[in-house]
Amino acid sequence: MPINAEYRGPGELPEVIRVFPLPGALLLPRGQMPLNIFEPRYLAMVDDALRDGHRLIGMIQPDVAHSRDEARPVLFRVGCVGRITQLAESGDGRYILELTGIARFKVVEELTVLTAYRQCKVDFFSYADDFVARKGEEEVDRQALLEVLTDFLEANNLKVDWEGIESAPNEALVNALAMMSPYGPAEKQAMLEAQNLKTRAEILIAVTEMDLAKKRTSGDTGLQ
């Protein structure tokens, strides 16, 4: 989805961003993520994001495995910032919104703030290539990706819009499949931190093949 704001490089994004820790959530550059916001602290976060004009929210996973405080888990070191590109009020106190991914970031430090939501100082320069649409997509093994997708759909008795898939550029295809994949936080984080689109596709293929092998061994053809 095109967005009104044009971000041409890391220097055009703020050094401090609001972050939304969400297990299993994977936002990637130019990908779209729907969110249902109902907690008061995150409703306030959306209000503040709209008020300051940037409309930016950083999606990041909590690193639960290495956290001692369940109420405030430590965060993974890499996330992805998105811009609010759609928003609707539900009528019962919720926001229904969509984030469009802009670029990944590394957490430099989490700040001590007065807001109920968390904020981090971040670095976008490590992911400068994220600002270049379709960067490196010619290196993706599209055929291998489509083959494993076919196997996955057959194993889980699922259908897909093949016309849409066949017309999608490699970047959109890889990132959409990665974001929609049913895998856990560790796999999602690996795909997020992949060095490039080719590596992300390879990780997605590998974890899908492992998942399919487990299902064949156990005789389970349903989603885990």
Image (cartoon, rainbow, N blue to C red):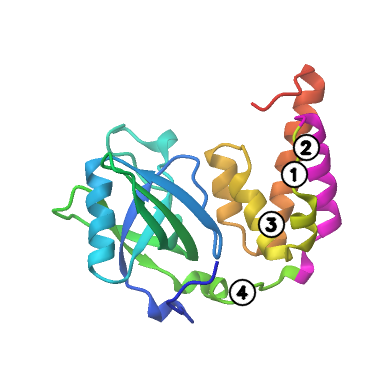
**Mark with earlier residue (4, 1):** 4
Pinpoint residue 5: horizontal percent, then vertical percent.
42, 77
CB under 8 Å between callouts 4 and 3?
no
Residue at 82% of width from left, 59% of height from top? 141
Name the quadrant containing residue 174: bottom right
Q: Is residue 102 above or below residue 40?
A: below
Where residue 146 appears, x then y in whole percent? 82, 51
The residue under label 3 is which amino acid type?
Answer: Val
Residue 99 locus on image (x, y percent): 45, 58
- Location of the N terminus (image quadrant): bottom right
Residue tagged 4: 133
Residue marked by disc 1:
160
Q: Residues within 10 Å of mark 2 (few under 14, many from 20)?
A: few
The residue at 26%/51% (across/down) is 118
Q: Is residue 143 magenta?
A: yes
Which segment did they paint magenta? Answer: 138-157
N-term-proximal mark, 1 vs 3: 1
Camera-side mark, 4 or 1: 1
- The answer to which image quadrant residue 45 occupies is bottom left
- In three-dimensional space, the C-alpha distance between marks 2 and 4, rounded to whole angstroms, equals 28 Å
| Label 4 to label 3: alpha-carbon separation | 13 Å
Residue 201 figure quarter: bottom right
User: What's the residue type where badge 4 is placed?
Assistant: Ala
Residue ID for mark 2: 153
Looking at the image, is mark 1 or mark 2 nearer the viewer? 1
State yes or no: residue 161 in magenta: no
Amino acid type of the residue that numbered disc 2 sits on in the rendered structure? Leu
In the displayed structure, 207 sits above or below 164; it is: above
Secondary-structure class at tag 1: loop
* Element marked by disc 4: loop
Which residue lies under the disc numbered 3? 174
